[in-house]
Image: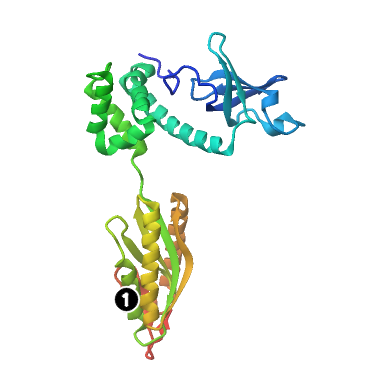
Amino acid sequence: MLDIMQDCRMYENKFPEVDSVVMVQVMSIAEMGAYVQLLEYNNIEGLVLLSELSRKRIRSITKIIKVGRKEPVLVLRVDQEKGYIDLSKRRVSPEDIAACDERFTKSKMVHSIMRHTAETLEVELETVYKAIGWPLYRIYGHAFEAFKLMISEQEAVVKRLEAFHGGAIPDSTPRTLEVLMTNIRRRMTPQPLKIRSDIELTCFQYGGIAHIQDAMRAAESVSTENCPVKAKLVAPPIYVLTTQTLEKQAGVETLKAACEACKASIEGSKGKFVMVSEPRVVSEREDRIWELKLNEMEEANREVSGDEDSEDSYEEGMGDIDIDKKGALVV
């Protein structure tokens, strides 16, 4: 069986080009400078010269560069015959760092997908790169962009790949693309973002509960196909508006519009709207913590004396709210 610990460089060229910025990991520090491994080029060794570590006077080298840290560095010289690669940390601009970080993140994702594909098929990783990975880098600028496109337009990408090879993709079978697509979909299918805004609603007018229900319906009426808005009671007078979408900006704008619709509705009934938190993306961890807190608050709300006598509720999660004989909210 093929050794599954196989690896190879991420790009077609065995060595980086002079003046390019590459990602390295610091392995050791010596008198001459820092010895590093070029992570995108199968961990070949390079040297960041002492004079190229910083523009400032070096008092302590360990404060500038540390063993184990990943750093974007500029390629100064490459001697392919002797295998020498001289690098510079001090000549890298903030723009270079941002671009290198983005490229390396994408390349790591591509590399992981390629490795899993090669391991599943039990073939050499370099074989899969030669047939699919490196040609896609040439065609699309980065294989990551091609992989993203393959989720929705696999046939179009495969046709361009076949055209690149002048016919069938070498060293591949229908199973090759099947395994590749399985890995791409598993790793790269975008996950919906959850966007949330917390608000307070009160209305002490006659029929206040109905006005609050109308305000929540007004918020939900702003929903679009890609950004459905849901309104839920936390604990009077706190409510939460949420939406899930693949487009962050569209989701935030939709939730802002929902807040405005909710505000206009409740204030039109002489109620009060307070924005507790602006629409924002919440992480899975934040969402889990919020759900636990929400459940605790709902449980506490159910245990409040008199809740069982409440008759009015909003079917989408308005919770137990009642009004007294004068029309004031009882919470």
Three-letter amino acid code of the residue under disc 1: Asp
Instruction: Find the residue positioned furthest to the front.
Output: 19
| Residue displayed at 31% across by 59% down | 228
| Residue displayed at 25% across by 36% down | 153
Evaluate whether residue 242 shows in this view: no
Q: Position of residue 157 (x, y in %)?
A: 27, 31
Quadrant of res 234: bottom left
Describe residue 223's horizontal placement relative to residue 50 as left or right: left
In the rendered image, which residue does mark 1 sit on?
Answer: 214
Evaluate whether residue 51 shows in this view: yes
178 relative to 149, above or below: above
Which of the two residues, 255 or 294, is positioned nearer the viewer here?
A: 255
Quadrant of res 62: top right
Which of the two residues, 242 or 86, is positioned nearer the viewer here?
A: 86
Q: Quadrant of the C terminus?
A: bottom left
Q: Secondary structure at mark 1?
A: helix
49 relative to 241, above or below: above
Q: Position of residue 69 (x, y in %)?
A: 60, 31
Q: Quadrant of the N terminus?
A: top left
Mark 1 crowdedness (10 Å alpha carbons): few <14, some 14-19, many ≥20:
some
| Residue displayed at 33% across by 18% down | 122
Instruction: Find the residue positioned furthest to the top.
Output: 81
Q: Position of residue 114 (x, y in %)?
A: 37, 25
Describe residue 91's horizontal placement relative to residue 317 as left or right: right
